[in-house]
Structure formats: C-alpha cells, structure tokens
Amino acid sequence: MSLKAIAAALGLSVTTVSRALNGFDDVAEATRKRIEAEADRRGYRPNAAARRLKTGRANAVGLVFPVSNASLNDSFYSEMLLTLDQCLARHEIDLLLLPDKNPDQQRNLLRMLRSGALDALIVTHTTPHDPRLLRLQQKGFRFLTLGRSRLPQPYAWFDYDNHAGTLLAAQHALQQGYQNLAYLGGNELSTYILDRRQGFMDALMARPLSQHMAALPPTRRSGYQQTRAWLAQGSIPDAIITDSSPLGEGAAIALQQAGRLSGAQAIALYVYDGLPHDSIIDEPVNAILQSSQQRIGERVAEMVLQLLDNQPPEQLQTLWQPMLRLTSDAQ
C-alpha cells in the first residue's frame, strides 16, 4: 500500500501524508489524525529505513543492563521490561537490551552511540558517582536512568524512594516491640542498595538495640544460608528485613524449615518487593511494595518519549513512594 493511495483517498498531497506519518510537527493535528486513521484502515506501515533518513532518528532506545548484578529471570523486572517494550512499540520504537559487564562493553556502547543506531539510553543499576552517566553527559547524549546518581548537570531519572521503604519496615518492627533486628542486604554498590541499607540504619540510629547486618550476593541461597547462621547463634533476631525478593525467599525457606515463619515462635520477616511470583513459600510475609511493574513500565516509556521530544531533563524526574503490606492485611 503506497502513500499515493492514502493521499488520493483523502484529497491530500503525498508530501503532507508522508510528513504526518513520519512524525513531522508541521501538519495540523486534525489532518494528522485523518491520515493516521486511513493508514491504519489500510494496514500501511512506513518504511523504517526511509523514515530514519527523513527524521534523523534511529527509532531505537537501548537499555543498559548489568548482567552480573541482576537477572533477567527476575519476574518483577521482566514484567516492567515487557510493558516498556510494548509501549515503545506502539510508537514504532524498538527497545534493545545492551549487556554492560566490563569496560570493553562500555567502549562498544560508545561506538554504537557514535554510529547513530540509538536515539537514547535507559541506564539501570546506577551508582552514587556513576562514570557511565558522566560520560553520557559529557557527550551530550540523551539518557534516562532507573535510579539516581550525583552528576554536575540535571538529567532524567525514574526512581523509588528506596530509603523510605526499609525505614518504614524498621520503624514498624520497632513499634511492635522487637529488640533484636537483622538486615539482610545485597553487596552491590548500586544506589538503591545503599539507600535501602541506610534507611534501616537511620531507623535504628536513636535506638541502641541489638542488630545483625549482612551484605551478600542477592540470591536465594545467600538469604537461606545467612538466616540459618543467625538461627544457630545465641542471639536470634526477632525480626529480619531483606532488601530483595531472592534474599527474602531464602530467609523465608530457612525460617519455615525451623518452624519460625509462623506461629507462636515466628520471626517477623519484611521483604522488599515481597516474595517472587513463583515462590515455593505460600505463607504471607510483610512486604515493602512499590507500584506495579506494569505502571512503572508505562511511566518510564512516557518519560522516554518526552525525552525524545526534547523535554528538558530537569522536568523528567519521578520519585515514587513505597508502602508496607503487613501479613495481617493479607490474611
């Protein structure tokens, strides 16, 4: 199906039809909608290569994912990525996953940026002083981060208030009268890991209570082994807060095996993001929850589109607050 057929059907010039379908802003909105409706009715799709030549865009966004730090098998993260991909696809924009695991990969990424193959980047697992983001700012390349960093210039970011989440959990534990709190966290240097740990520490700052802290690989095995080690000690925690679902499920399995997940001798367990969707544990735990991953994917996609439309980065900064779901709410 050609542009000429659409133009003839609407009584418009081929140039007007082409510019409307390729995203130029010099076509009246009412006319654009007529053209898009006729194109949809006829099943027309613009030629991607031709559109790139006309608009100067690659119609592709890269998502930098450090495979050594997190797994694409994470069901929460996968749901967000699926929604993000679907939202961008509705605007004829491809989402490309780019592994980031060593300096060579960063050099490869810079070569890709210079080639014009990407219109923008989404950078995950940011660190407090992230050299990747500083390099992108210096190059003047458009990017949005999932997480925050300290940079000399404003930039676009989406984040949760990770500090507030563990603070909520620890404060609730203290209100319940627990005196021996444990924190089971990841050993990465990502900002969100550090913020979650700091939230726990700030809650206990004014309370000289017994506490245990562990920084481990964010896996179910690590959570299981560390919780078993705590249970074998003389000073057993009466509440455990974990900063991720895998660590939380490992802790839950250890507590269940010891008969301490529920009942009179239960140790309160607070899990950031809750247990995985496919968890083998069917008993409820206290959960630090963020918005649904579908809503997060939709919001990130919206911000990416605004970034591509040259909205100033200081206007593209979103911080969402967590909530605490208690086992009493789930029963």
Image (cartoon, grey):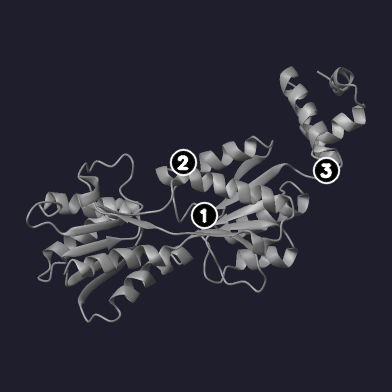
Counting residues from the N terminus, which is met first, the one under dot 1 or under dot 2?
1
Dot 2, how many residues are within 10 Å of its Cα: few (below 14), some (14-19), or many (20+)? some
Q: CA distance from mark 1 to mark 3?
A: 37 Å
Circle 1 SS class: loop
Dot 3, how many residues are within 10 Å of its Cα: few (below 14), some (14-19), or many (20+)? few
- Identified by mark 3, the residue type is Asp
Circle 3 SS class: loop
Question: Are the residues at dot 2 and dot 3 in contact (C-beta closer than 8 Å)?
Answer: no
Q: Residue 25's mark? A: 3
Counting residues from the N terminus, which is met first, the one under dot 1 or under dot 3?
3
Q: Residue 79's mark? A: 2
**Image point 82% across, 32% down: which residue?**
31
Residue 322: x percent and y percent?
40, 58
- Identified by mark 2, the residue type is Glu
**Image point 30% across, 48% down: which residue?**
275
Q: Is residue 204 left or right of residue 47?
A: left
- Identified by mark 1, the residue type is Pro
Q: Is residue 63 at least partly visible in the picture? A: yes
Dot 1, how many residues are within 10 Å of its Cα: few (below 14), some (14-19), or many (20+)? some
Which mark is in front, 1 or 3? 3
Which mark is in front, 1 or 2? 2
Q: Quadrant of the N terminus?
A: top right
Residue 82: x percent and y percent?
52, 39
Q: CA distance from mark 2 to mark 3?
A: 33 Å
Please tell me in which quadrant of the rendered image residue 227 appears. Answer: bottom left
Residue 80: x percent and y percent?
49, 44
Circle 2 SS class: helix
Q: Which residue is mark 1?
A: 66
Q: Is residue 147 left or right of residue 181?
A: right
Please tell me in which quadrant of the rendered image residue 209 appears. Answer: bottom left
Counting residues from the N terminus, which is met first, the one under dot 2 or under dot 3?
3
**Image point 41% across, 67% down: which residue?**
163
